[in-house]
Image (cartoon, rainbow, N blue to C red):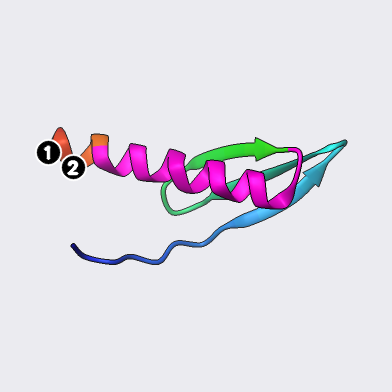
Amino acid sequence: MKTRSFTIAVYKEDDMYVAGCPEVGTVDQGETMEAAIAGLKEATRLYIKEFVENL
């Protein structure tokens, strides 16, 4: 399995943290920074899996 590194940008909006991956375009949010990042990692993983399956 090939390992890739992506950028994660996190910012706080009101009472939520928003995490985004600019290279892929995925975004997720959470009540904590850790939750937002964990959700973003899962969303990005699923997006890439779907993308590769449809090549």
The image quarter in which residue 4 lies: bottom left
Residue 40 to residue 5: above or below: above
* Chief secondary structure of the magenta portion: helix
Locate the N terminus by quadrant.
bottom left
Q: Is residue 4 left or right of residue 26?
A: left
| Outermost residue to the right | 14
| Outermost residue to the left | 55
Whether the magenta-drawn stretch holds residue 34 is answered as yes
Residue at 44% over, 62% down: 6
Residue 45, image x, y percentages: 36, 45
Identify the element where label 1 is drawn.
loop
Residue at 45% over, 38% down: 43
Whether the magenta-drawn stretch holds residue 20 is answered as no
- 2 and 1 marks in contact (CB < 8 Å): yes
Residue 11 to residue 31: above or below: below
Identify the element where label 2 is drawn.
helix
Residue 35, image x, y percentages: 65, 45
Which disc, if any, is residue 52?
A: 2
The image quarter in which residue 3 lies: bottom left
Amino acid type at mark 2: Val
Observer-nearest residue: 13 or 31?
A: 31
Amino acid type at mark 1: Leu
Residue at 75% over, 46% down: 32
Residue 10 to residue 2: above or below: above
Residue 46, image x, y percentages: 35, 38
Residue at 71% over, 51% down: 33
Observer-nearest residue: 19 or 35?
A: 35
Give the residues in magenta.
31-49
Residue 44, image x, y percentages: 41, 44
Residue labelled with disc 1: 55
Q: How many marks?
A: 2
